[in-house]
């Protein structure tokens, strides 16, 4: 027969555990289906990709973004595709860029819209079938999508 | 017909990796705004942009509504021979645009 103290302790641990698991699920969720779409289920490794974006963006309608990949773009192993994913935009795939060995350098840069402070992810597909990724957090003072002007 | 501006170096050595930039005049309408009568302004963005260097595709971009109005893109390519870089693009309304710039390769 458990004492009252044992019961309260067990109940508390259970509650904490369920809260924790909810939190983890919410954090890992938003990118998972998008990543699966891009890679077709292949594993992704961290690294080789650099995602440059300001930590604090004033205007969510035009945030400069640069993605570069450590790769010499030789025909044997070159970057084939780079995609940029957003955590909170209504359409999370911002863009996909196709490169060839003729590019000589694996770097692209553009300006994007962001619907609020969020995490961004860039994934690069190499011709040898490996996928590499990087993420960055950005704070947006004035969101895109909210401005009705 | 949309306007675009391409920037490439005035000349390049053979084999040099050069920077190519393009800015296109386009609203990249995201489809989330309303007009004065409360109707949704339909989504209309440049969805595909292709760059060809002397007829060979060197760069392709699939864009969405997450790209800013008047899209700007920068990438690199190896200058091999004098000729043209030609961009062509199409938006959701089916409107096509294109622009070209001369690549001058010396040596």
Image: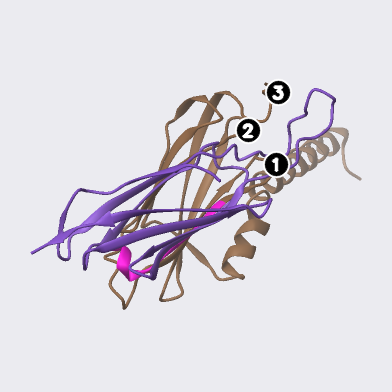
Chain colours: A brown, B purple
Which residue appears at 73% of the width and 31% of the height? B33
Provide the chain ID for the residue under circle 2.
A
Q: Is residue A101 magenta?
A: yes
Instruction: Give the mark, 3 or 2, whose residue is nearer the N terminus.
Output: 2
Residue A115, numbered circle: 2
Q: Is residue B43 magenta?
A: no
The image quadrant that residue A41 belongs to is bottom right
Q: Is residue A51 in view? A: no
Left or right side of B18 for A90: right
Q: Position of residue B100 (x, y in %)?
A: 37, 54
Work out how far the residue at label 1 is from the one at label 2, CA to CA, in angstroms.
8 Å
Residue range corresponding to the magenta coloring: A95-104
Instruction: Give the mark, 1 or 2, whose residue is nearer the N terminus.
Output: 1
Q: Quadrant of the C terminus of chain B?
A: bottom left
Q: Position of residue A20 (x, y in %)?
A: 70, 42
- Could you tell me which secondary element the residue under label 1 belongs to? loop
Work out how far the residue at label 3 is from the one at label 2, CA to CA, in angstroms.
13 Å
- Is B72 or A71 nearer to us in this picture? B72
Foreground label between 1 and 3: 3
Provide the chain ID for the residue under circle 3.
A
Is residue B14 depicted above or below B62 in this figure?
below
Which residue appears at 26% of the width and 64% of the height? B83
Within-10-Å neighbours for mark 3: few <14, some 14–19, many 20+: few
- Could you tell me which secondary element the residue under label 2 belongs to? loop
State if disc 3 and disc 1 touch (CB < 8 Å).
Answer: no
State if disc 2 and disc 1 touch (CB < 8 Å).
Answer: yes
Q: Which residue is mark 1?
A: A90
- Is B42 or A37 nearer to us in this picture? B42
Residue A148, numbered circle: 3
Within-10-Å neighbours for mark 2: few <14, some 14–19, many 20+: many
């Amino acid at each position: 027969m458990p004492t009252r103290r044992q019961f309260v302790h067990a109940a508390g641990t259970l509650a904490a555990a369920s809260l924790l698991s909810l939190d983890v699920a919410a954090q890992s969720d938003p990118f998972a289906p998008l990543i699966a779409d891009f890679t077709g289920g292949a594993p992704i490794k961290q690294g080789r990709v650099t995602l440059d974006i300001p930590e604090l963006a004033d205007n969510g309608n035009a945030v400069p973004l640069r993605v570069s990949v450590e790769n010499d773009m030789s025909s044997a192993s070159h970057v084939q595709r780079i995609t940029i994913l957003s955590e909170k935009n209504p359409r999370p795939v911002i863009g996909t860029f196709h490169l060839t060995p003729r590019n000589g350098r694996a770097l692209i840069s553009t300006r994007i819209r962001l619907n609020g402070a969020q995490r961004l992810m860039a994934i690069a597909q190499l011709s040898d079938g490996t996928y590499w990724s990087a993420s960055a957090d950005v704070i947006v003072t004035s969101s895109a999508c909210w401005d009705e002007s | 017909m949309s306007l675009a501006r391409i920037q490439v170096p005035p000349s390049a050595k053979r084999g040099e990796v050069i920077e190519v930039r393009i800015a296109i005049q386009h609203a990249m309408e995201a489809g989330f705004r309303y007009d004065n009568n409360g109707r949704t302004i339909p989504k209309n963005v440049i969805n595909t942009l292709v760059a060809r260097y002397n007829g060979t595709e060197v760069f392709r971009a699939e864009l969405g509504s997450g790209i800013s109005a008047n899209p700007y893109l920068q990438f690199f390519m190896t200058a091999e021979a004098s000729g043209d870089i030609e961009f062509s693009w199409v938006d959701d309304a089916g409107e096509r645009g294109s622009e070209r710039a001369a690549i001058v390769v010396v040596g």
